[in-house]
Amino acid sequence: GGFTAKSYSQIAGANERVRVGIIGFGLIGRIHTRSFHGLKDQSKVVAVSDCYQPRMDACVELVGGDCTKIPDFRKMLERKDVDAVVINTGDHWHALQMLLACDAGEDVYLEKPLHLFVREGEWMQKVAKRTNRVAQVGTQQRSAAHYHKAKELLRGGAIGDIVSVQCNFFRNVMPGIGNPPD
């Protein structure tokens, strides 16, 4: 059937709150949940999915109790009271969960990395386009002006021809470095 006048009244407008489902409530999931929960006029965290029960309990506590716990993220994607999902799971889950979310009619905010293999990224683009879903990856650190300037310099040959790149990441986590740990 087609749309009726009643159908249009049930479509959320741009100024209405987006009902958000959180998939993965670890360190980054907690940060994103706080952010979305803080936007009370724009969004409402209505569901959380995590394979670890205490994390789901912590999410419900953070948002004040009005949040459904759903251990299997696929069940969250079946719900009609979730408009968009925030994917904060392990890196190897990102592509699959994004593809399934778009196919289920959900818009997606996806934590980095977007995917592990180039082919996954190609599939993700095709599915987002086919399903007409909004899909965004959290690459805030790559969009600032100084990153664009660095890219221009590198592409312009400022340090010569680049033939190899090595990246390392060291995180200062407990217990720390040194003896005793600092």
Image (cartoon, helix red, strand yellow):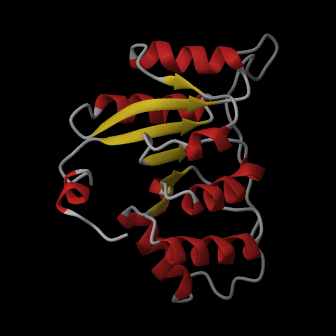
| Direction from residue 27 to residue 44 in the image, left or right | left
Q: 77 or 23: nearer the eye?
A: 77
- Taking depth in this image into account, of 66 and 175 the one nearest to the observer is 66
**Position above or below: 112 against 23:** below
Count the labels in the image. 0
Quadrant for the C terminus in the image:
top right
Apparent side of residue 141 relative to residue 104 in the rendered image (left or right): left
Give me the residue at 51% from left, 71% from top: 131
In the figure, 1 relative to 159: above or below? above
Where is residue 140? Give x, y as percent. Answer: 45, 55
Q: Residue at x 79, y 20 (%)?
A: 178
Which corner quadrant of the image does residue 63 belong to?
top left
Name which quarter of the figure residue 3 lies in: bottom left
Point out residue 31 in the picture as x, y percentages from the top left corner: 48, 31
Q: Is residue 91 left or right of residue 125?
A: right
Is residue 98 placed above or below 58 in the rendered structure?
below
**Residue sitting at 60 percent across and 21 percent down?**
56
User: What residue is drawn where x is 51% and y is 44%?
Assistant: 86
Q: Is residue 169 above or below residue 126?
A: above
Residue 167 percent coordinates (x, y): 73, 59
Residue positioned most to the front: 1
The quadrant of the image that shows the N terminus is bottom left
Q: Position of residue 38 (x, y in %)?
A: 31, 29
Residue closest to the eye, 181 or 89: 89
As drawn, is 101 to the left or to the right of 119?
left
Residue most extreme to the right: 179
